Image: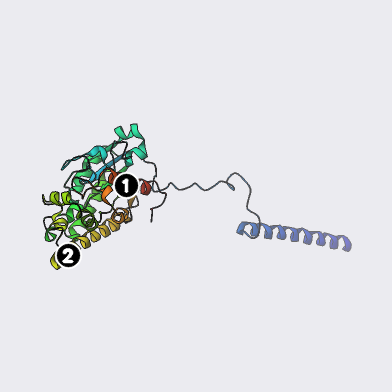
Amino acid sequence: MRNRRHRSRGAVALAAAALLGAGALTACDAQGGNSSAPNGPSAHKPSPKPTPTWDTSPRSMAAVGDSITRGFDACSVLSDCPEVSWATGSDPEIKSLATRLLGKERAVSHSWNHAKTGARMTDLSEQIERAAAERPELMTVMVGANDACRSSAAAMTPVGEFRADFEEAMRTLRRALPKTQVYVSSVPDLKRLWSTGRTNPLGKQVWKLGICSSMLADPDDLDTGATQRRESVQDRVIAYNDVLKDVCAKDRRCRYDGGAVFDYRFDGDQLSHWDWFHPSKNGQSRLAEIAYRQVTSPKPVA
């Protein structure tokens, strides 16, 4: 009897130990331990890829801005020529941004030019309101040159006003089109345009009609006063570009060109032979190349 009781107690002890061991393994598995990951449909399910913030192939676009986007003086003197616009032009020689992005046929029906010669930053909100009616997937902005090109350096738009107007324009855009992408071009280097154009006698005669007097007045005057005037205009353009960069950086669907247009060294071939200041057809094509490279890059071009 003692032996049977002993064997019985031994069996119970072994069973209890087995249960405790199983419990310990279960607890370890529940806590993660060193066990392998569980198998099953959910174990190997890939994480969804986030949708890129910037779409490199928008299917429609609108342009807002000033005379450059209207192709001013590219075809005839003191006249708009939107068919050669870098943004939405239909001229095959230009290969506009719209043509490159959308194709020739679709560009005709799905791109719109709301820029206006003489426009300043204060006019941008109104242009955007009109452009928003087409609900474009991409909007190009090139404005600011006329804020610096005034009757005198003293008449230039103050930087604070320029910033406030651009911020308001972006708010106007976002109220109407929360997901539309925005490509913002830098203001061109006006001082370089003066330096290049002043070598042409015809251009200087056209400048006397009042084109960008703050920079272009008395183009051959190199005394201290004239030099300081041009430097103040140049400084203001740089400040405007800083504003464009700062405000655009606060909007996840806005891309600034990084100063690409400001840095581009326009020469005689890229300047209008009517005024030696606005882009020629060749210059418009160069602007289209810059914009296309920026818009189709997965990341902003440095």
Residue 85 position by quadrant: top left
Q: Nearer the viewer, residue 35 or 46?
A: 46
Percent position (x, y) of residue 136?
Answer: 30, 40
Query: Tag 2's secondary structure?
Result: helix
* Viewport quadrant of the N terminus: bottom right
Left or right: 13 in relation to 281: right
Q: Relative to the observer, which residue lies in front, 205 or 67?
A: 205
The residue that mark 1 highlights is 286
Point out which mark residue 242 bears.
none
Residue 195 in view of the camera: yes
Label located before the other in sequence (2 or 1)? 2
Across and down, in percent, residue 253 comes to 34, 49
- Quadrant in which residue 69 is drawn: top left
Image location of residue 186, percent across then percent down: 28, 54
Identify residue type, mark 1. Arg
Q: Residue at x 28, y 41 (%)?
A: 62
Dot 2 crowding, Cα within 10 Å, few <14, some 14–19, many 20+: few
Which residue lies under the disc numbered 2?
227
Q: How many marks?
A: 2
The quarter of the rendered structure image containing the C terminus is: bottom left
> Badge 1: how crowded within 10 Å, few (<14), some, or many (20+)?
many
Residue in the image at 15% along x and 59% along y = 220
Alpha carbons under labels 2 and 1: distance apart: 29 Å
Quarter of the image where one finds residue 24: bottom right
Q: Residue furthest bottom?
A: 224
43 above or below 218? above
Q: Horizontal placement of 168 versus 6: left or right? A: left
Q: How is the image coloured?
A: rainbow
The amino acid beneath tag 2 is: Thr
